[in-house]
Amino acid sequence: MTKDTFKNLKDENKTYKNLYDGYWKESKSGKYTEIFSPIDNSLIGKIQSMNKDEVDKAIMNSKEAQVLWQEIPVNRRSDILNRAADILYEKAEELAEILTMEIAKDRKSSISEIQRSADYIRFTADAAKNLEGETIPGDSFPGTKRNKISVVTRVPLGVVLAISPFNYPVNLSASKIAPALMAGNSVVLKPPTQGAISALYLAEVFNMAGLPKGVLNTITGRGSEIGDYSVTHKEVDFINFTGSTEVGQHISRITTMKPLLLELGGKDAAIVLEDADLDITVDNIVSGAYSYSGQRCTAVKRVLVMQSVADMLVEKLKDKISKLKSGDPREEAVIITPLINKASADFVMGLMEDADKKGAKLLVGGKRDGNLVYPTLYDNVTLDMRLAWEEPFGPILPIIRIKSIDEAINIANESDYGLQSSVFTKDIDKAFYIANKLEVGTVQINNKPERGPDHFPFLGVKSSGMGIQGIRYSIEAMSRPKAVVFNLNNVE
Ligand code: NAP
Ligand code: G3H
């Protein structure tokens, strides 16, 4: 593959087009959104602001394409996905550069996002081949004879609208597209505005891998302009959304009888007991809270620590957090990078102001330079502070000191969110006791919250989401059982 492998998706002025019916097309709207890098404000390119007619055309084209795609044998769908995974691997460095510039993700994490997406696609291609239906004999139900047998297979839903967030524009697009396609659906991808360019490259990877025309179309434009129209479109059969709780709840309010998978915000707690291995705990809390500057749904967003070990934990955290390198994500070993935009940095600073006013103790950070917010740690955070409850999506961590396990459980569960929680302890009985009581999708024992490995179920409860991701779970979410009942005449 040559250097200009990706020449089709943009013109010489760095204006990116949209994938429509197998070709990269310009919008007739004549409107564009300029995408600037959060690193240095340089112009990366322009994306098209599609109008509603064009969104409609894309969805209708995907609907037509799905009819043929569902007839293609699963092993051939799988071959196409495996080719896409190969291309992603081969192009990982080039795509990571684009991702780093567009969302200010450090270089190592950008490469890892691309490679993880390739692994996800490959695993999905294999997993779908191993999915089996079932036959159910009728006579196990009272009053039914042996002459009835139900043959249950899984069939696609139709057109899946995939909406991804800025913080994983490639991976959280791939992890919707791949299982949707393997289940026999077509996909309309609405990427985040900031992150759209990286996601459009991913779409071209699927296109280059030989996906038939129209099976994957992309629509770009601000969610505030084309979002409501897309999610309420009558030919969209399933919405697979990852993003903020605010937008997720809005989608849920305005749609009627549309199946939804919503992966939303979080306020994941790390609960630290007296007997925790503090070195393991600190490593996990720091990488959990500060990687990609805290812009992860599964970031550690509060620490609930037993008073008796709090001073020791705080000292170790302070030491490690002070050593985190901040700056340009293209530089070696930089972890803390500029936040995605000014509004995000302003929001984090607002949380600090509130915490300062209410008497929290600032231990590290507390400063910004443009959109770069330095890694920040607060001790003695109390429950009247916004920092105890709100999702910062930035590099700031509150420590709340607790006196008992039940107090930790109560504070953890008082949150509106319910994505994940971590428990750090060597006592397996206490770990199970706490895990059973926490109202979250996943509890991690002695590890930071995290989505992977990607074949595990990943879900949020309460305001953190609805439905289940994870390779097999995602394929199942985007397909439904279909039963054919055989009624045999010559069997009693
Ligand atoms: P966001 O503002 O909610 O945007 C997410 C996506 O929704 C973007 O593509 C956005 O497009 C689109 N959108 C906006 N308004 C819409 C509407 N009315 N209808 C349809 N789509 C609409 O979230 P974000 O700032 O990108 O991501 C950060 C949030 O996502 C955090 O809260 C984080 O916790 C959450 N998140 C959750 C998970 C999880 O798995 N639980 C994973 C990652 C992120 P535009 O960009 O054009 O506005
Ligand atoms: O931002 C939300 C992602 O789903 C988190 O994924 O735990 O692999 O960073 P991660």
Image: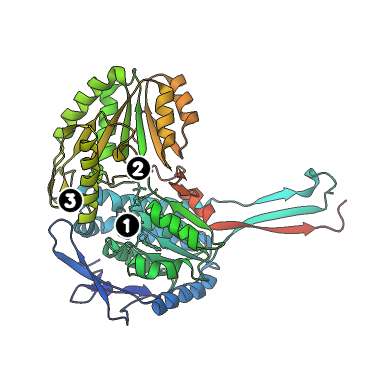
**Is there any visible trace of residue 148 in the rendered image?**
yes
- Name the residue nearer the viewer: 99 or 422: 422
Circle count: 3
For label 3, the residue is 338
Going by the image, does 2 lie left or right of 300?
left
Earlier sequence position, callout 3 versus callout 2: 2
How packed is label 2: few (under 14 Cα within 10 Å), some, or many (20 or more)? Answer: many
How packed is label 1: few (under 14 Cα within 10 Å), some, or many (20 or more)? Answer: many
- Gap between marks 1 and 3 measured at Cα: 19 Å
Query: As shown in the figure, which amino acid type bears the numbered disc 2?
Result: Thr
Q: Position of residue 150 (x, y in %)?
A: 73, 54
Q: Position of residue 451 (x, y in %)?
A: 38, 43
- Label 3: element kind: loop
- Find out if the beta carbon at label 3 lies less than 8 Å from the nearest ligand 1 atom: no
* Circle 1/circle 3 CB separation < 8 Å: no
How packed is label 3: few (under 14 Cα within 10 Å), some, or many (20 or more)? Answer: many
For label 2, the residue is 298
* Circle 3/circle 2 CB separation < 8 Å: no
For label 1, the residue is 170
Query: As shown in the figure, which amino acid type bears the numbered disc 3?
Result: Pro
Q: Position of residue 136 (x, y in %)?
A: 72, 49
- Find out if the beta carbon at label 2 lies less than 8 Å from the nearest ligand 2 atom: yes
Query: As shown in the figure, which amino acid type bears the numbered disc 1?
Result: Val
- Image point (42%, 61%), residue name: 162
Q: Position of residue 203 (x, y in %)?
A: 35, 65
* Quarter of image, ligand 1: bottom left
- Name the residue nearer the viewer: 406 or 101: 406
Earlier sequence position, callout 2 versus callout 1: 1
- Name the residue nearer the viewer: 224 or 380: 380
**Is there any visible trace of residue 443 in the rendered image?**
no
Q: Nearer the viewer, mark 1 or mark 3?
A: 3
- Name the residue nearer the viewer: 407 or 117: 407
